[in-house]
Structure formats: structure tokens, C-alpha cells
Amino acid sequence: MSQNNMTEDEALSALMSYVFSGGLGAPTGGDAGYSLIEATPTSFSWSVALDGGEEPSAHPDRYRINIDRKSGQITSPGPIAISETEQAQAIASATGQTLTSSTRFLDGAHSISYKVSVEENPDIAYLIHLRHHGNVASMESLITRLLRTPQAVNQNALPIPAFFPIPGERERQESTGLGRQISLFVPGVLASTIYPNLSHEDKLVFIRKVALAFSASWNISLPDPIMIGGLHATTVDDNIILDVQAERHHGFGGPFLSVREYLESYVKASFRALEKQQGIEEFKKKYLKRIGNFVRTRLHKISSIVEDVPIVVLHSNMGPHNIIVSSDEPTTFKAIIGWTYVASEPFLAVNRTVEAYFREPALNGFGPEYDKANELREAFWGTIPYWRRWGETDASHVFREWFRFGLFMKPEGRPADLPEAESQAFWSENVRVVEDFLDRYE
């Protein structure tokens, strides 16, 4: 441990030692999922769950564990859950209805949820989310603002589930660090389960709707001075007031007053992630020193032209896993979800998310292109010609180079049992992007 307060890495190491030594009960031989809830000058607070080993649970119990940064003392785990009594009280205060049944529903990376029925209307259901990332009051205000955009009103470009604010929840979340949120349950299937198998014609229809959804938020005006970071919203009377705070999705700081400053912090954060990444020793041996030297000495080469790239309101993760479609009509969008992270960022920061619609799913995060992928790209950008023109500027070209360098410098861990050909190809895109970039800018 360091002489002063524990760093986040030191606290995480202590947390994992505690968990796998029986802190959450007898170890199962599986892995542990964890997420930082809160960091203060005196403590860290984590959400932790064991995956169950050979018999994983669909809903593993999650616990909140606090670590004192000075002493290293770990508190006894407290369950992250909402009792049925609390659920009934929340439903009553938010909707005026009476809860009749409750079951655990899908767990997100930063939340758990319950699907509940009510006495007054057996034909509908609600979801009660317990979130340990994201300010629920801000999310609800942001969604209200998004739904007022012309594209959302006139083209139904942003189908977002109805939310039912719980009175007093802003103050409750400020005191507990955990926020409760109620939304209308939307039946359907996640697009990630069906999109790869759609016909090319259906993919074209689908991707045009994705483009309209992105542009609906991109067209929202941001407050002056325009900054880059996590977007926060407050409702005052009937007005939605936006302000920009630190970047929360990847946690590399801010808010930033310039695109250059944002790119510098992004590349530095990517390099720190590369240093920590496990299972890529062969890649590190070849590239870690070279990349590190570049990051330490060459970031001044980011051209000021990138300041021309538009900064927009951005859903940070609008991939197919956050789109619910009709089970009968797979190109009919029922809901866009995952609004925990909404940012004020350069519009091209969606590079990897958009690219996922043009490539097959893969363990390395960058699978082979679909047949006629160029037609899919044309369909996306052709649907939003204003943004395509911006994407073709010199400023966007330079931004994209630096952003992709940060994106690809940290490869995913390569499974040990891959056939030789697949093993050789696993990091090929990382190698290509990194080498091409360094050869150009070193």
C-alpha cells in the first residue's frame, strides 16, 4: 500500500483479495463482477457480485462494499436490492397504483431491476431499476429534453420508455449513492440478438433508423461555453437546464474546454488501460514501450484543426444491445434504452458504436465486415447528410485518426485455445491501426 491514501488500483486489489478469501461466502471458482459506485477523498465504494462458477445465477446477488482509503479497513458487505415493501411504496408514490407481484429482471452493468405488475391495470408492467451509476433525476430531465426535439416529435426517432419519477429520489440518491427509477416495461427483443442475422435489406432499414436516432440528439443546442464531458440536466419549472460535468463513462476527467485537451486525456487514459490489461503480454512486449514514449512526448502533435469538430449531445452507448425491437417486425424500434451515460462530446466519439452495425460480433470487438458493409455505411451517413458533410472534413479526419489510436491501442485479451490462424488475426486490426498511426506521427 502507498504511504498515503490508497489509490483506486490498490483498493481494487484489496477488494478482490477480500472477495476471493470468502468475504462474500465460500468462493465458487468463478469470477467476480465489480463496479465503482463512488470515490471520495476518504473511501471507495464498490458493487461486487460472484458469478457462481459452474452454476451461474441469472441474477447473482450484488453487494456494496466500502474501503477506507487511509486504514484499508473493509466494511461488511451490504446487499444491493430493493425489498418488495420498498417497491410497493415506490410504485404507489410514482404512479398511484398498487403492486401485486415482483420478479427480478435483467441486470445491467451498473444496475439491477425488477419487473412488477399492478392491480389497477394487469395489461401493463413496470420496471424498477436500482442504479449505482448515473443520476436518475438528471436522466429523467435529459430524457424529457430529448423527447422535445423535432425529430423525436415528428419522426418518432427516439422511442424512449415512459419514466415515472419517484418523489424525493434526487435527495435520496444524494444520501445513499443508489438511485431508484421506474419505467414502463416495453415488450420486445434486444436488437443485438437479431441484427446480425437480418437480411441486407432489413439492415439498411434498421441502420437508417439508427442514424435518425443519433442525429435527433446531435441537433440539441448545448449551453455556452460549450464544453466536453458528462451531461447533467435539471428541471426548473418546465425548463430543462443543461450543464457539463466530468466525463463519467470512461472516467478520464473533464470537463474539457477544447477538443485537443479531450483527445490528450482520452489517449492518456487509453494508455493507462493498456498498461493494466491482462492477457496481452505478447502485444505489450512489442508495442508498450513505443506507445508509451509517443504518449509522453508527442501529444502536442494533435492539430488545432480538431477544434472545428462539432460537439453534440451523445448517447454514449447506442449499440444494438440498447435497442428493443418488435419480436414480429425486427426493423420496428420499440424503445432505445441505456441512457445512464449521456455526454457532451465530439460527434465522432461514436466511432466504435456505429462501426458495430457494419461488422459481425467478435471477441476482439472488431469482427469482419458484413457483406456490402459499404452500403450500410452509405445508408447511415446518407440519412443524415449534414453530419456526413462534417464527417468528410479535414478536422474530422484528423480527429478520427487520434480517436482510433486511443481506441485500438488496448487490445482485448486473446483466448488461449484459438486455432493458429484465428490467433494470428485476433489483434490484426489493433496492430494495423497502431503501426499506421505511429509511422505517421512519430
Image (tube, grey):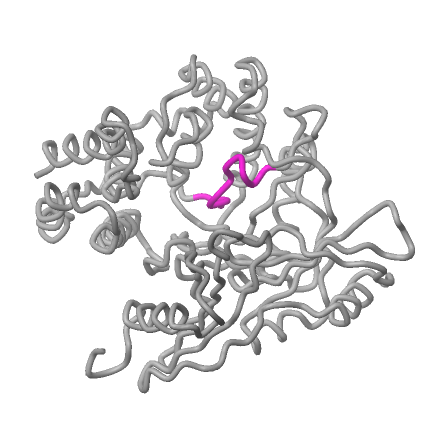
Whole-percent x, y for residue 42 in the image: 37, 82
Whole-percent x, y for residue 127 in the image: 71, 54
Q: Quadrant of residue 440?
A: top left
Does 128 sit above or below residue 421?
A: below
Whole-percent x, y for residue 251 in the image: 36, 58
Whole-percent x, y for residue 130 in the image: 62, 63
| Pick the front one: 34 or 352 | 34
User: Which residue is found at the position 23% from the left and 83% from the top?
Assistant: 4
Q: Quadrant of residue 227?
A: bottom left
| Pick the front one: 435 or 420 | 420
Q: Which quarter of the image is occupied by the C terminus?
A: top left
Q: What residue occupies the far right of the structure in this picture?
A: 120
Q: Is residue 313 magenta?
A: yes
| 357 left or right, relative to 81 | left
User: Which residue is found at the position 43% from the left and 56% from the top?
Assistant: 30
Q: Which quarter of the image is occupied by the N terminus?
A: bottom left
For residue 24, say whether it is visible: yes
State which region is magenta: 312-323
For residue 261, say whether it is visible: no
| 201 left or right, relative to 329 | left
